[in-house]
C-alpha cells in the first residue's frame, strides 16, 4: 500500500506547494507516496459556508467548529489504523523518532487548524493526536503539516537516492551530524580537514563520530544528556571545528 497523507485544511491550494519540488516532488510524481488535500469548507452547511465562530467564554479570534470539522473528517473516510493528527502548538513534539514511526505506517490524516484553534470536542470525539513542530505559534497548521510530511517522505523506501543516506544524519543516533565538506579543497584559506582526505575510512569514521559528539554536547546539552544516558558515554571529545 502506498504511503498517503490526507490533509484537512481551509487552504487546499497551499498543497503540494513545496512538497511538489525536489526529492518529495519527484517521489510524488513517480507514485512513491500520495497526497490528498481536502477543503474543510466543503463540509460547511450554511449559506455563507462558515466554518468558525466566536470562542465560548469570550476572548479574541475565532474557533473552528466541532460539527463542521467532524463532518470533514468523516467525509475523508480514513481507514482504521491510519494515525489521525491535528497540528497544534500544545501537541507532542515532532521528533525524528515520531517521523520514523509515521513514515513506517500507512500515512496520517492531518487536520490543520487556523484562527485561535479548534473546538476541543472534535479533538476528543475523533481521537485526534496533537502534534507540534516547535515552541512558537504559526498562523495555521499547513506549514507544520508540510514539515511533518517532508520529513516522513524522505524516509520512504526508494525516495532517497542512496538507501543508507538517512542512517548517520542528525538525530538518527541521538546526535547532531558532523560537519560536511566538499570541493574546493581550499576555500578562502580554509582547507578541508586533512583526515577527510586521508582515504583511511576508519579514521574518517572516528573523526566524524568525535565531531558529532562534541557538537551535540556543545549545542544541545539536552540531546547529549539523553545520548550519554543511553550509551553510558559521559565524555565528549573536544571538537576541532565547533565552538
Ligand atoms: N491559540 C492557539 C494557537 C492557534 S494558531 C494557541 O495558543 O495554542 C492556529 C493554528 O496553527 C493551530 O490551530 C495549529 O493548527 C497551527 N499551529 C500554530 N503553531 C503551531 C505549532 N507550533 N505546531 C503545530 N501547529 C501549529
Image (cartoon, rainbow, N blue to C red):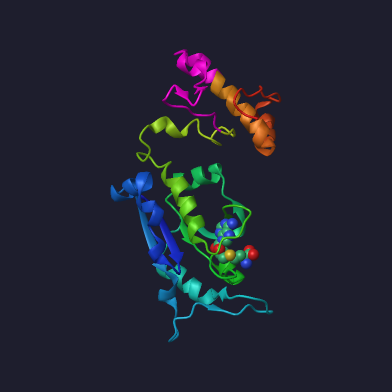
In the depicted structure, whether residue 23 falls above or below residue 85: above
Q: Is residue 214 visible?
A: yes
Question: Is-magenta flag for residue 191?
Answer: yes
Q: Residue furthest front?
A: 188
* Quarter containing the C terminus: top right
Residue 181 x/y as whole percent: 47, 27
Name the side, left or right, on which 175 lies relative to 229: left
In the foreground, 134 or 193: 193
The residue positioned 55% from the left and 42% from the top of the image is 97
In the depicted structure, whether residue 197 falls above or below residue 45: above
Question: Is-magenta flag for residue 193?
Answer: yes
Name the side, left or right, on which 153 lies relative to 101: left
The residue positioned 49% from the left and 57% from the top of the image is 143
Q: Which of the 4 quarters of the picture holds residue 116?
A: bottom right
In the depicted structure, whether residue 52 falls above or below residue 78: below
Quarter for ligand 1? Answer: bottom right
Name the side, left or right, on which 65 lies relative to 162: right
Residue 202 x/y as whole percent: 50, 15
Residue 242 x/y as whole percent: 62, 29
Q: Residue furthest left?
A: 30
Q: Which residues are magenta?
A: 177-206
In the foreground, 37 or 120: 37
Name the side, left or right, on which 129 lies relative to 102: right
Count of number-bearing discs: 0
The residue positioned 47% from the left and 13% from the top of the image is 198
Residue 185 x/y as whole percent: 44, 21
Q: Is residue 32 visible?
A: no
Amino acid at each position: 500500500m502506498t504511503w498517503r497523507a490526507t490533509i484537512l485544511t481551509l487552504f487546499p491550494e497551499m498543497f503540494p506547494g513545496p512538497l511538489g519540488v525536489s526529492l518529495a516532488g519527484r517521489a510524488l510524481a513517480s507514485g512513491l507516496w500520495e497526497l490528498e488535500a481536502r477543503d474543510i469548507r466543503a463540509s460547511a452547511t450554511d449559506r455563507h459556508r462558515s466554518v468558525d465562530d466566536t470562542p465560548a467564554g469570550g476572548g479574541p479570534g475565532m474557533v473552528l467548529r466541532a460539527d463542521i470539522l467532524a463532518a470533514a473528517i468523516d467525509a475523508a473516510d480514513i481507514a482504521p489504523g491510519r494515525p489521525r493528527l491535528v497540528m497544534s502548538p500544545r501537541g507532542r513534539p515532532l521528533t525524528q523518532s515520531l517521523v520514523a514511526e509515521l513514515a513506517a505506517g500507512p500515512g496520517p490524516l492531518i487536520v490543520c487548524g487556523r484562527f485561535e484553534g479548534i473546538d476541543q470536542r472534535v479533538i476528543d470525539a475523533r481521537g485526534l493526536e496533537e502534534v507540534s513542530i516547535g515552541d512558537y505559534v504559526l498562523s495555521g497548521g499547513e506549514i507544520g503539516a508540510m514539515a511533518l510530511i517532508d520529513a516522513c517522505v524522505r524516509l520512504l523506501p526508494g525516495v532517497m537516492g542512496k538507501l543508507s543516506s538517512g542512517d548517520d544524519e542528525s538525530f538518527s543516533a541521538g546526535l547532531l551530524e558532523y560537519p560536511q565538506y566538499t570541493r574546493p579543497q581550499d576555500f578562502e584559506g580554509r582547507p578541508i580537514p586533512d583526515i577527510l582526505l586521508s582515504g583511511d575510512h576508519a579514521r574518517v569514521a572516528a573523526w566524524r563520530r568525535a565531531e558529532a559528539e562534541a557538537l551535540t554536547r556543545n549545542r544541545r546539552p539536552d540531546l547529549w544528556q539523553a545520548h550519554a544516558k543511553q550509551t553510558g558515554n559521559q565524555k565528549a571529545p573536544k571538537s576541532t571545528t565547533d565552538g
